[in-house]
Amino acid sequence: MLKGLAITPPVVGRISIGRVVEKNGKRLPEKDDQFTITTQIHGRDGWLLHPLDSELRKLCTGKLRSIPVRFLFADPDLNLRAEYSLFERETGRPVCVGNGESCRRVGNDGIETLPCPSPDGCAFGQKGSCKPYGRLNVLLGDEDETGSFIFRTTSFNSIRTLAARLHYFSAVSGNLLACLPLELKLRGKSTTQSYRSAIYYVDLGVRTGSTLEEAIIQARELDARRKSAGFDQTALDAAARAGFGNGAFEENAEDGAAVVDEFYPAEVPSGDDKGNVETGAPTASGLKARLDQRAALLGGNAA
């Protein structure tokens, strides 16, 4: 295994509740009130829709506001990773990642471990727009049992709610989180920071039409079948934990460029709660410019 490279769950698609639009020459996040499931391929008009997006829309009346999911890992903190994060805007390179107590920061002498007072109390973080950043990996469908869809967010509401639900469901099921049939749900609320307009965040619950008791019974049955087949959930969690710990940062510069486009815009419209703007795909023009710049650099190196 390459040292310094975080080994993260394989991603086969994305889940978002927003997008990035260009207004007056600026790239700004635009919220949405439904889920969108895309592939990892970016076309001229944005991220290409995943076939599951249309399949799930056929099962609902109206907008896609719930998605049936399972989880890869029994440990809640492996399914959802959240830290205070700061990225270099030009390159997308992660610069500083912290948990409110300590942080890993890129300095002149390499990666340093320093105290992390959270963005509000950190002069370095305030200059670089440090804010919470979460990644949730979920399983959709039955085709790929280790290939996940990723939901990224900088919303306090989504991060806090998902973290609570994951730990609660793990506790009440007897550590059978990876076997529970659950669903992501989109919820709305109004706050003073949103000027009483609706903002949307992601929640987690049992699937529509089921109860928690029924979900736990199904989880026990699935757990028994897996153990009978030789499935080792403990070893899977241990492998994932080692993979995450193999690198200083989960994102690399290549993925970070898209993350900055989506979640760390230079300016957020007034009236929006920065912690609750759930954004999605970057527009084609912005991503194309980054790809053209990368291609030019590679061409120059080759020459």
Image (cartoon, rainbow, N blue to C red):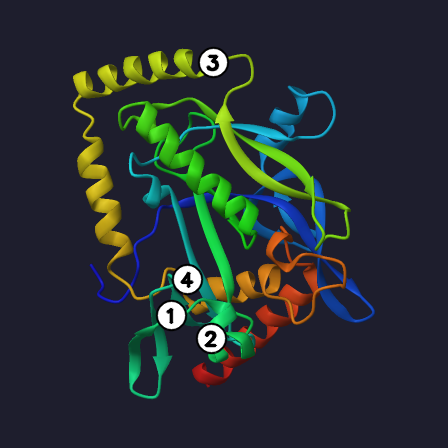
Q: Pointer 2: residues within 10 angstroms few (<14), some, or many (20+)?
A: few
Labels 1 & 4 near each other (Cβ < 8 A): no
Labels 1 & 2 near each other (Cβ < 8 A): yes
Q: Position of residue 222 (x, y in %)?
A: 30, 17
Q: Which mark is residue 211?
A: 3
**Rendered residue at 35%/16% (across/down):** 216
**Rendered residue at 55%/55% (across/down):** 154
Q: Pointer 3: residues within 10 angstroms few (<14), some, or many (20+)?
A: few
Examine the rendering and report whether any part of residue 217 can be seen: yes
**Rendered residue at 54%/75% (across/down):** 126
Is residue 297 shown above or below 87? below
Q: Which mark is residue 116?
A: 1
Question: Element under label 1?
Answer: loop
Question: Element under label 3?
Answer: loop
Q: Position of residue 239 (x, y in %)?
A: 21, 45
Q: CA distance from mark 2 to mark 4?
A: 22 Å
Give the mark, 4 or 3, whose residue is nearer the N terminus: 3
Give the mark, 1 or 4, whose residue is nearer the N terminus: 1
Q: Mark 4: which amino acid?
A: Glu
Question: Element under label 4?
Answer: loop
Q: Which mark is residue 251?
A: 4
Q: Say which quarter of the image contains residue 301.
A: bottom left
Labels 1 & 3 near each other (Cβ < 8 A): no
Give the mark, 2 or 3, whose residue is nearer the N terminus: 2
Give the mark, 2 or 4, whose residue is nearer the N terminus: 2
Which is closer to the viewer, label 1 or label 3? 1
Q: Mark 2: which amino acid?
A: Cys
Q: Mark 2 highlights which residue? A: 122
Q: CA distance from mark 1 to mark 3?
A: 41 Å
- Taking depth in this image into account, of 254 and 276 the one nearest to the observer is 276
Give the mark, 1 or 3, whose residue is nearer the N terminus: 1
